[in-house]
């Protein structure tokens, strides 16, 4: 079989390694509020299992005293009861035993029901809490984290790993208590009934312990590998379903089928390694337990039918006690065989909780000061002071950028692709923190105000207008949930979206499909603009907000955007320079630095990069200086190679 080593590329390895005592955390941190159901489950489980042990004992009494000739009150199991309670006639004794057996079944059923309630309630509650807490934590992580992880991998933590916990907390705890009560209880009873024969019956127990220990050591790393490869399968599927349009149009179905087959095969192989170990382990365990049974039968049976103690043993063995021994060794086999499974479930749950807590403990680069004051926007003045930033260490995407925007002004960011325009705006939204320098809004450093207040003050329309599965209206009111229908329609009108929405089959109640696939790119952008209009933010950030709409619609939206931007500070990135030529200030970025700055007319007069870009868009390609064309060629080559060092 192919040997798979996934540990090297487990996406959560780094996180996992930092987690200490994950199971203790799970049980004590998340389990604490549910101590009641856990206690009910545990106690009922112990009592239910103890009652399961009673019938065999009572049968022994019946065989020896009622069907045989032994004295009823002298039977080992009865000596704990006062003699006065015990019936004197044989018939009375018969009914006494019958009632006791029936009673133990009825009580047992009640405790089994309580145990089921307790463990299920406990595990469902924890599962729910862990899932919501993990999601809650995860969505607050930095954008950096999401850029480095695949969606499918995170999904597998939130679904598969959380489900593993539930399995352990319910089935695992249940089997564990059964195992402990059965092993301890039966050992105790056997020693009480006949310590010599008990030694024979329990001889395989240490063997089982050693066997299981070896199994656990071997299976542990395999389970971690299985969990991680599940994540990879999910990621692949997620990616492919998301890009199904590209797959179809590129005619790459066979290629993708191969890739899916590949990850699935790797999952198969890792899982098979674990299965291979497991399927040999359980029958082995059963075999060892069976040896105990056979030994008991041979030694005990010989003892009973010859009437003399075999080998080193002394005394007599009553038939009833022998039967009880046989029944108990039988009762012991299954919980023993499950010993491995319990440990198994524990291991899986541990691997899963490591991943879960690893995710929860993940520290972002963005520090959050929970006690920070809210941002107070007065004029809406924004200053960038010597701002530098890189997504990764030793890399500078933004290099010493400084500029001021007065309240209510519109500043346009232009420049070649990869110049860092979007990054400049991400820093304002504090999706990332600056490495050097500072960004201030009305004098308040964005790092020193509370994040919710900062983001609340801004409206952002990005290049890809993501819509949630739901109606058009739900997508417009997203974030401004209390808006009235009139306000929504007003916002849609400003975004030039009202007319097309009215023509949709269900108007504002039309479902947009997943990610908004039922709308065109331009329609999605207009819904996103309407969302920003409705929010009525102090600062508006438009990152190529109209890139997907046709020129005519853009002109229409531009009119409403002009209204929208009139009284608020606006940042706009645009490739079509005609849309920003009226901006109060135009910043031309190149290679992460401000290359030029001024109004449209000033920049045209300068004859620099902006004037050339303008020339390109005006169709004056012939008139461009050769040097500009060469620089553009160099720049695009660099961007394609992913090298941005200027
Ligand atoms: P623009 O908006 O001017 O096209 P961006 O700000 O999007 O430029 O990107 C600037 C540079 O930063 C590009 O070279 C891009 O490859 C890089 N970049 C953008 N986002 C990330 C990211 N999340 N991680 C690493 N590098 C990034």
Image (cartoon, grey):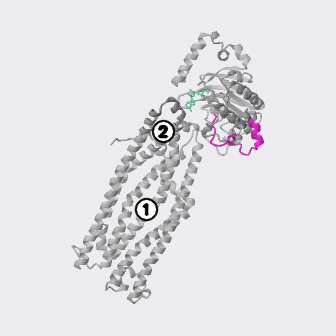
Can residue 313 be seen here?
no
For the point 47% across and 34% down, the residue is 253
Q: Position of residue 376 (x, y in %)?
A: 74, 39
Looking at the picture, tell me which residue is in the foreground, 503 or 303: 503
The label number, if any, that marks residue 176 in the structure image: 1
Q: Nearer the viewer, residue 569 or 448?
A: 569
For mark 1, does the 10 Å Cα neighbourhood hold few (<14), some (14 to 19), or many (20 or more) residues?
many
**484 falls in the magenta region:** yes
Q: In the rendering, which numbered label is found on residue 236?
A: 2
List the single residue furthest toward the bottom: 89
Kindly state the secondary structure of the residue where label 1 is placed.
Answer: helix
Query: In x, y percent, where is residue 359?
Result: 53, 45
Q: Secondary structure at mark 2?
A: helix
Q: Is residue 147 left or right of residue 69?
A: right
Residue 85, given in percent of the width and then of the height, sits at 44, 86
Viewer-proximal residue among 233 and 412: 233
Q: Is residue 554 magenta?
A: no
Task: Name which quarter of the figure residue 84 lies in.
Answer: bottom left
What residue appears at the point 42 percent right and 84 percent down from the top-left corner? Answer: 95
Residue at (52, 40) in percent of width and height: 238
The residues colored magenta run 465-492
Mark positioned earlier in the residue sequence (1 or 2): 1
Residue 183 visible at all:
yes
How dense is the environment of label 2, judged by Cα within 10 Å: few (below 14), some, or many (20 and up)? many
Quadrant in which the N terminus is drawn:
top left
Depicted 93 relative to depicted 477: above or below: below
Ligand 1: which quarter? top right
- How far apart in space, not on screen, are marks 1 and 2 (Cα)? 37 Å
């Amino acid at each position: 079989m192919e040997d798979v080593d996934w540990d090297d590329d487990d996406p959560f390895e780094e996180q996992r390694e930092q987690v200490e005592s994950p199971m203790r955390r799970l049980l004590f941190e998340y389990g604490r509020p549910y101590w009641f159901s856990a206690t009910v489950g545990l106690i009922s489980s112990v009592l239910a299992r103890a009652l399961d042990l009673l019938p065999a004992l009572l049968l022994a009494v019946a065989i020896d005293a009622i069907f045989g000739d032994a004295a009823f009150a002298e039977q080992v199991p009865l000596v704990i009861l006062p003699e006065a309670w015990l019936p004197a006639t044989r018939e009375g004794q018969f009914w006494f035993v019958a009632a006791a057996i029936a009673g133990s079944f009825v009580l047992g059923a009640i405790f089994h029901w309580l145990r089921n309630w307790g463990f299920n309630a406990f595990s469902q509650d924890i599962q729910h809490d862990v899932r919501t807490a993990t999601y809650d934590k995860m969505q607050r992580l930095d954008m950096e984290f999401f850029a480095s992880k695949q969606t499918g991998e995170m999904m597998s933590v939130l679904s598969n790993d959380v489900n593993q916990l539930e399995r352990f907390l319910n089935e695992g705890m249940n089997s564990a208590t059964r195992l402990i009560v059965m092993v301890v209880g039966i050992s105790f009873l056997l020693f009480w009934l006949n310590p010599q024969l008990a030694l024979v019956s329990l001889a395989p127990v240490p063997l089982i312990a050693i066997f299981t220990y070896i199994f656990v050591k071997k299976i542990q790393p395999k389970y971690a590998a299985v969990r991680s490869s599940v994540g990879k399968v999910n990621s692949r599927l997620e990616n492919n379903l998301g890009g199904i349009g590209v797959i179809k149009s590129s005619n790459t179905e066979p290629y993708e089928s191969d890739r899916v087959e590949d990850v699935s095969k790797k999952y198969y192989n890792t899982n098979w390694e674990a299965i291979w170990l497991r399927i040999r382990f359980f029958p082995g365990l059963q075999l060892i337990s069976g040896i105990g049974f056979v030994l008991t039968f041979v030694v005990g049976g010989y003892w009973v039918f010859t009437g003399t103690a075999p080998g080193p043993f002394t005394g007599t063995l009553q038939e009833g006690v022998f039967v009880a021994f046989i029944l108990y060794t039988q009762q012991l086999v299954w919980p023993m065989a499950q010993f491995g499974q319990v440990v198994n479930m524990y291991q899986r749950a541990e691997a899963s909780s490591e991943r879960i807590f690893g995710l929860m403990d993940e520290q972002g680069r963005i520090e959050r000061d929970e006690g920070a004051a809210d941002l107070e926007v007065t004029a809406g003045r924004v200053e960038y002071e010597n701002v530098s930033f890189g997504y990764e260490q030793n890399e500078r995407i933004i290099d010493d950028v400084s500029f001021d925007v007065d309240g209510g002004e519109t500043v346009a960011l232009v420049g070649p692709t990869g110049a860092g325009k979007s990054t400049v705006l991400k820093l304002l939204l504090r999706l990332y923190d600056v490495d050097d320098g500072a960004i201030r809004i009305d004098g308040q450093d964005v790092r020193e105000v509370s994040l919710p207040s900062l983001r609340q003050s801004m409206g952002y329309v990005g290049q890809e207008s993501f819509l949630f599965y739901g109606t058009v209206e739900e997508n417009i009111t997203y974030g401004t949930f209390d808006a009235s229908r009139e306000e929504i329609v007003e916002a849609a009108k400003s975004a030039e979206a009202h007319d097309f929405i009215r023509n949709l089959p269900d108007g504002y109640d039309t479902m947009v499909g997943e990610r908004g696939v039922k709308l065109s790119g331009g329609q999605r952008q207009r819904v996103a603009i309407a969302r920003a209009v409705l929010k009525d933010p102090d600062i508006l950030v438009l990152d190529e907000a109209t890139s997907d709409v046709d020129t005519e619609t853009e002109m229409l939206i531009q009119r409403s955007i002009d209204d929208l931007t009139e009284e608020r500070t606006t940042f706009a990135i645009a490739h079509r320079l005609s849309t920003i030529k009226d901006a109060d200030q135009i910043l031309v970025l190149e290679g992460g630095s401000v290359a030029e700055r001024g109004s449209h007319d000033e920049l045209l007069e300068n004859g620099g990069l902006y004037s050339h870009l303008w020339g390109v868009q005006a169709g004056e390609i012939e008139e461009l200086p050769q040097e500009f064309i060469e620089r553009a060629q160099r720049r695009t080559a660099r961007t394609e190679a992913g090298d941005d060092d200027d």
